[in-house]
């Protein structure tokens, strides 16, 4: 049984711009290129879900246009982490003390003061991950880098991240597909 996670195409946001839950647009041609890159490699008739944010929803719709056997259902559990007051700011403009406080209590401090804690985010994603494992079927998620990193941890048996250095830091390319097997 496979879980295929596809990251949305590159957004129009400038590099260094914090946009977790912010609905940042993607150029249509980049979405179409990402859909063309992954559509043929997806399993026929798999359950497909997407983050409700337009950057993922648009990619899921573009994939479904190429693959009529697939139908995407929005799932709020697949949305990117809510980064609270840090949303729509440059990461470099966020006070170092705020970031250090988040790192010191990485599991339970709410990002940006009013966003999600890492524990809340992991629990939300774990709900979708557990439902996939219980389903016994292949699934496709069109989602975000944070969700893909959370699934990497969940797949490895880690349900909560206590320290910032435990969070996966590897880059995940825009439009990339990452596969997990159970």
Image: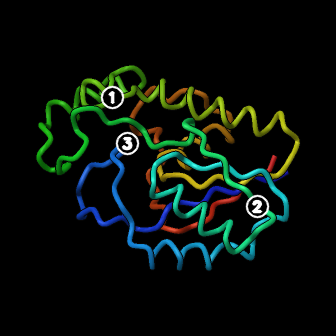
Residue topped by disc 1: 115
Residue 88 has which mark? none
Name the residue: 56% across, 67% down.
176
Query: Which badge, 1 or 3, comes first in the chain's sequence?
Result: 3
Query: Which badge, 2 or 1, comes first in the chain's sequence?
Result: 2
Q: Residues within 10 Å of mark 1 (few under 14, many from 20)?
A: many
Residue topped by disc 2: 70
Q: Nearer the viewer, mark 2 or mark 1?
A: 2
Name the residue: 45% across, 58% down.
55
> Mark 1 near mark 3, Cβ–Cβ under 8 Å?
yes
Q: Where is residue 1 drawn, in percent x and y? A: 85, 50
- Position of residue 43 in the picture relative to residue 74 (left or right): right
Cα separation between marks 2 and 3: 26 Å
Name the residue: 37% across, 35% down.
82
Cα separation between marks 1 and 3: 9 Å
Residue topped by disc 3: 21
Q: Residues within 10 Å of mark 2 (few under 14, many from 20)?
A: many
Q: Where is residue 145 drawn, in percent x and y? A: 48, 53
Q: Residues within 10 Å of mark 3 (few under 14, many from 20)?
A: some
- The quarter holding residue 136 reads top right
């Amino acid at each position: 049984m496979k879980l295929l996670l596809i990251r949305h195409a590159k957004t129009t946001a400038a590099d260094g711009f914090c946009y977790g839950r912010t609905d940042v647009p993607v150029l249509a041609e980049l979405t179409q290129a990402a859909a063309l890159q992954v559509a043929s490699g997806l399993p026929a008739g798999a359950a497909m879900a997407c983050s409700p944010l337009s950057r993922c929803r648009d990619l899921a719709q573009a994939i479904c246009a190429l693959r009529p056997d697939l139908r995407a259902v929005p799932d709020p559990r697949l949305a990117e982490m809510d980064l609270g007051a840090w949303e729509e700011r440059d990461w470099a403009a966020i006070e170092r003390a705020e970031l250090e406080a988040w790192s010191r209590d990485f599991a339970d401090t709410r990002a940006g003061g009013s966003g999600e804690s890492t524990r809340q985010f992991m629990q939300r994603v774990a709900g979708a991950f557990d439902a996939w494992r219980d389903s016994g079927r292949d699934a496709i998620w069109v989602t975000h880098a944070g969700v893909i990193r959370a699934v990497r941890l969940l797949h490895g048996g880690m349900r909560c991240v206590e320290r910032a250095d435990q969070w996966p830091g590897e880059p995940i390319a825009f439009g990339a597909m990452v596969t997990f097997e159970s």
